[in-house]
Amino acid sequence: MRSLEESKEEAERARARLEATFDTVRRRTKPEALLGSAKDEARKQALKAGAAALASGRFRPVLALGIAATSIAYLFRNPLLKALNKRLGEGEKHD
């Protein structure tokens, strides 16, 4: 049988391990840490998609160009629409 002192020491070590585990969980579940993990994962997925698009683009360049142009137009739709409206609005004024 173990002595009372040994049991107390073992309980203290277990408590210290549990506290360390809680600290790790708290650190990993902070919003900043979760956001960083999400950004890293999104970056990895974007790189995978880009590599797949490049591989596909080598075999079908016209299709890849069309997809790229559509994607760029979608991403920059607000500035493009503003510029187009401004251009069309200025074109209608004749002094």
Image: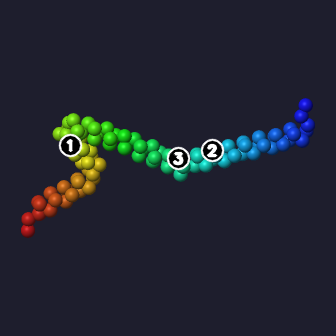
Does the CB distance between marks 2 and 1 fall below 8 Å? Answer: no
In which quarter of the view is residue 95 placed? bottom left
Against 29, residue 87 (above or below) is below
Q: CA separation, marks 2 and 3?
A: 11 Å
Q: Earlier in the sequence, mark 3 or mark 1?
A: 3
Place of residue 39 in the rendered image (x, y in percent of width and height, measured from the top left): 45, 47
Place of residue 4 in the rendered image (x, y in percent of width and height, measured from the top left): 91, 38
Q: Residue at x 19, y 40 (%)?
A: 61
Q: CA separation, marks 3 and 1?
A: 35 Å
Question: What amino acid does circle 3 point to?
Answer: Leu
In this rendering, does residue 36 appear at all? yes
Q: Residue at x 58, y 49 (%)?
A: 30
Q: Residue at x 87, y 39 (%)?
A: 6
| The N terminus lies in quadrant | top right
Does the CB distance between marks 3 and 1 fall below 8 Å? Answer: no
Q: Which mark is residue 65?
A: 1
Q: Earlier in the sequence, mark 2 or mark 1?
A: 2
Which residue in the structure is indicated by mark 2?
Answer: 25
Of the residues tagged 3 and 1, which is closer to the observer? Answer: 1
Judged left or right of residue 40, residue 65 is: left
